[in-house]
Image: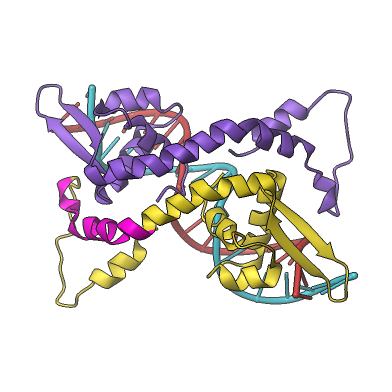
Chain colours: A purple, B yellow, C cyan, D red
Amino acid sequence: MISNKWTALVFYAMESGKIRYGEMLRRVEGISKKMLTQTVRKLERDGLVQRHITPTVPPSVEYSLTPLGETFLQPMKELRQWGRVNYTQVVEARAHYDFAKHSELVQCIRTDIDSKKEDDAKYDH
Amino acid sequence: MISNKWTALVFYAMESGKIRYGEMLRRVEGISKKMLTQTVRKLERDGLVQRHITPTVPPSVEYSLTPLGETFLQPMKELRQWGRVNYTQVVEARAHYDFAKHSELVQCIRTDIDSKKEDDAKYDH
DNA sequence: CTGTATCCGGGCTGATACTG
DNA sequence: CAGTATCAGCCCGGATACAG
């Protein structure tokens, strides 16, 4: 369920209770409207999230966790907690990882310009 | 880290201690050699997994969790436990989800043949 | 405000062949 | 046994435009 780019982040956005669509769009940094809608739809389909529409003009839509969704909160929080605690260790490990260890075709070219930051930016989280 | 198809499953394969490459290939159902290698490499890079090579002929390679990886075991186990406990509820929710609720172009065609099972198979886990 | 429709590119993924 | 190399497909995800 959470093995994709946005589900976990969207899920976390609802941990404190009801939240509107636009608010999630701002809270979940970097997500597009399309992916937000697609993600909450799947969570709704799975019974973790409920949608509440207030038919005003313009309409207002609030999302919140169902009782089932609430039970999923604890394991997800622990997951996040682990990440927060061990984030630096993982970053450290990545920085020290010797790519030459497994690659025959090693890029040995090292320019004077420190390209480390650019490389780090390319790592997936 | 686990927001992709195989990482969590590969990680679980190492929960009981050292395990060989070929054994993981069999244990993690459906994974290809390429994806297994790619996944364990990332876990190694992140410092969660260590690789131990016995240079016999043919070679033997054992993978195991590092101390850091061991600390990740608990949150991951709770995640899995949640899945096992609530699996049927999620399946139930999916079965009852009314796709027409959000779709303008509803596929109303229902053949006499029960296509439900095929549809279910297409759902991503 | 809360979406949907459409297009499109890149990366994930699988299949197959090859190697020490 | 434990990989690597290469290729091709396809879905995920982003950008943009449009709508109720």
Measured as percent of width and height from the top left, residue A91 is found at: 68, 34
- Residue lying at 70% horizontally and 44% vertically, measured from the top left: B47
Measured as percent of width and height from the top left, residue B43 is found at: 66, 49
Residue C13, by quadrant, is bottom right
> Looking at the image, which is closer to me, A115 or B75?
B75
Residue A60, by quadrant, is top left
Relative horizontal placement of residue B98, taking residue A30 as reference (left or right): left
Span highlighted in magenta in the image: B84-101
Relative horizontal placement of residue B78, taking residue B65 as reference (left or right): left
Measured as percent of width and height from the top left, residue B74 is found at: 52, 48
- Residue lying at 31% horizontally and 32% vertically, measured from the top left: A14
Measured as percent of width and height from the top left, residue B112 is found at: 14, 77
Q: Is residue B3 among the parts visible in the rendering?
A: no
Residue A113 covered by magenta stretch: no
Vertical arrangement, residue B46 with respect to residue D14, above or below: below
- How many numbered marks does the figure carry? 0
Vertical arrangement, residue B121 with respect to residue A96, above or below: below
Residue A8, by quadrant, is top left
Relative horizontal placement of residue B122, taking residue C10 as reference (left or right): left
Residue B85 covered by magenta stretch: yes
Prevailing SS of the magenta stretch: helix
> Looking at the image, which is closer to me, A30 or A44?
A44
> Looking at the image, which is closer to me, A17 or B39?
A17
- Residue lying at 88% horizontally and 73% vertically, measured from the top left: B56
Q: Is residue A49 among the parts visible in the rendering?
A: yes
Q: Quadrant of the C terminus of chain A?
A: top right
> Looking at the image, which is closer to me, D10 or B6?
B6
Vertical arrangement, residue D3 with respect to residue A29, above or below: below
- Residue lying at 57% horizontally and 46% vertically, measured from the top left: B72
